[in-house]
């Protein structure tokens, strides 16, 4: 078998002035574990937000390019692991069906966003503290 030789290493371009420097920003993906289970994270939060906006699990699943079955599975897992009923499904009929967040589901979603905002503020502060010399 032929050996592949690595190409020459390229050095990063030297920056002459601060105008070329980019602003450094901390990023994170935040999950909330309950009893060792991923009860709430970015994907499940997007699902809850889509249900709140469209009042339909089917519409939310399509919007997120997720199967209806997987969307239901995520909802069951959230409810099982948190002990909170997050959705109120309504069967179809003349007025049509739908799925809405319960008041507890709305509170859970708000708590996640508040938690995420506080953690993000801390991450940005820590990022500036540790990487300020390389940032704008």
Image: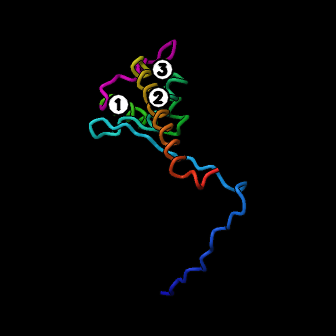
Query: In the image, what residue occupies the spot 47% across and 87% down?
Result: 1
> Tag 1 or tag 2, which sits nearer the N-term?
1
The residue at which mark 3 appears reads as 98
Residue 94: x and y in percent read 51, 12
Residue 18 to residue 55: above or below:
below
Query: In the image, what residue occupies the spot 59% across and 80% down?
Result: 7
Give the secondary structure at mark 2. helix
- Judging depth in this view, the residue of 48 and 20 nearest the camera is 20
The residue at which mark 1 appears reads as 76
Mark 3, other Cα within 10 Å: few <14 / some 14–19 / many ≥20: some
Residue 10: x and y in percent read 62, 74
Query: In the image, what residue occupies the spot 47% across and 27% down?
Result: 57
Give the secondary structure at mark 1. helix
Is 120 within the magenta?
no
Q: How is the structure coloured here? A: rainbow
Is 94 within the magenta?
yes
> Tag 1 or tag 3, which sits nearer the N-term?
1
Cα–Cα span, label 2 and label 1: 23 Å
- Judging depth in this view, the residue of 46 and 122 nearest the camera is 122
Q: Which residues are magenta?
A: 81-96
Cα–Cα span, label 2 and label 3: 27 Å
Q: Main secondary structure of the magenta part?
A: loop
Mark 2, other Cα within 10 Å: few <14 / some 14–19 / many ≥20: few
Left or right of 11 in this view: 65: left
Residue 39 to residue 26: above or below:
above
């Amino acid at each position: 078998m032929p050996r592949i030789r690595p190409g020459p290493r390229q050095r990063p371009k030297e920056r002459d002035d601060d105008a070329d420097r980019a602003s450094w920003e901390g990023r994170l993906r935040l999950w909330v574990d309950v009893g060792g289970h991923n009860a709430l994270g970015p994907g499940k939060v997007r699902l809850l937000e889509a249900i709140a906006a469209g009042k339909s699990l089917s519409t939310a699943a399509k919007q997120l390019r997720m199967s209806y079955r997987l969307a239901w599975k995520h909802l069951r897992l959230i409810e099982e692991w948190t002990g909170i009923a997050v959705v109120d499904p309504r069967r179809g009929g003349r007025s049509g069906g739908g799925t809405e967040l319960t008041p507890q589901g709305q509170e859970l979603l708000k708590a996640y966003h508040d938690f995420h905002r506080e953690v993000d503020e801390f991450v940005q502060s820590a990022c500036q503290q540790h990487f300020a010399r390389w940032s704008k």
